[in-house]
Amino acid sequence: MQTEMVIASQMVDNSTFKIKNSYLADARTIDRKLSIVIPRRGINDDGKGKKHALYRLISEAQTEYVWMLDDDVVFNSLEDSLSDYSLAFDDADLVILPLRMESENEHPSLLERLQIAEYAAIQQLTIESAQKGKAIMCSGANLIVRRERWLESYSDLHPEIPSGDDMFLLESFKRRGLKIIVLEDPQFEAIVHPHTSWRAFLRQRMRWAGKAPKYTDKDIIHYGSITLIANLLQLICPAIILIKFPIEYRLIKKRDKTISIWSALLLEILYPIYILLSIIGGLARRQW
């Protein structure tokens, strides 16, 4: 398959900035410092995989930084940030940018509400851990990286695994002592949409779980172990929810005050079940 990239540049529709479906064979630049690179879903660079495609195109870029986005993200106010973005990350090597999950439906389904609540907790953990200098997560859906540092880390991205370039990149940067910051500016917040089918949702979680054995960062392993143990204990002794729920509800509400306590509570009840299914399915098929 021919490598195709979506390039976002001067694509503003009224007050909403949305990535258009214009596919090009190379990356275009915003200015001399920054390129925006958005890999199309399913990209495989003639069978060599998404990571190989990213390596080739990022190596061809001429800018100091690369802004990596998913091809379906939406921005509410990106116009202004394109003009003052350079002030936001100074000399950082990796900039973790904010994300929010929103449904495209006026009345979100149960599955969508669960994902929105979970995503809020994940994003708050991402922000708080990075602010403490112990980043445990980042997402390639909205990420700025110093180009040369990304290229130097390519061998750490496990090219043999189709996904996970963002988390393996985070591990590599932490191991090398590079500067990682988180930027909470609402102008840079990208909106993603939840899955609408349980099958797609569980497949995504299985992909995430399937990569877990490859993680080597002590902060990521520590948090993952605590999460797994807490959820296994909840399956054995449901009363554990009385301890877990206040902690996780705080994370959710700090990130998104619109999420109801009932959605958060339902997530707390169901989470141990689908996380266990995801781990079993992910480990059964590690090459995602």
Image (cartoon, grey):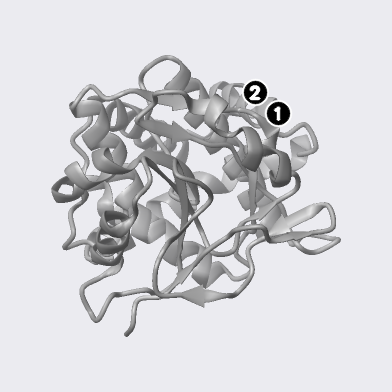
Which amino acid is tagged 1? Lys
User: Which numbered tag is attached to residue 250?
Assistant: 2
Question: Against 212, is 137 above or below?
Answer: above
Which amino acid is tagged 2? Arg
Q: Position of residue 220 (x, y in %)?
A: 30, 31
Identity of the residue furthest to the front in this view: 32
The one nearer the camera, 168 or 122, is 168
Is 196 left or right of 105, judged from the image as shown?
Answer: left
Is 218 left or right of 155, judged from the image as shown?
Answer: right
Decide: few, some or many residues near mark 1? Use Cα within 10 Å; few <14, some 14-19, many ≥20. some
- Which residue is at 41% across, 31% downward? 230
Which quadrant of the figure contains the N terminus?
bottom left
The one nearer the camera, 36 or 204, is 36
Quadrant for residue 21, please give it.
Answer: bottom right
Q: CA distance from mark 1 to mark 2?
A: 5 Å
Quadrant for residue 176, please give it.
Answer: top left
Decide: few, some or many residues near mark 2? Use Cα within 10 Å; few <14, some 14-19, many ≥20. some
Question: Against 184, is 285 above or below?
Answer: below
User: Which numbered tag is attached to residue 253?
Assistant: 1
Q: Position of residue 67 (x, y in %)?
A: 46, 47
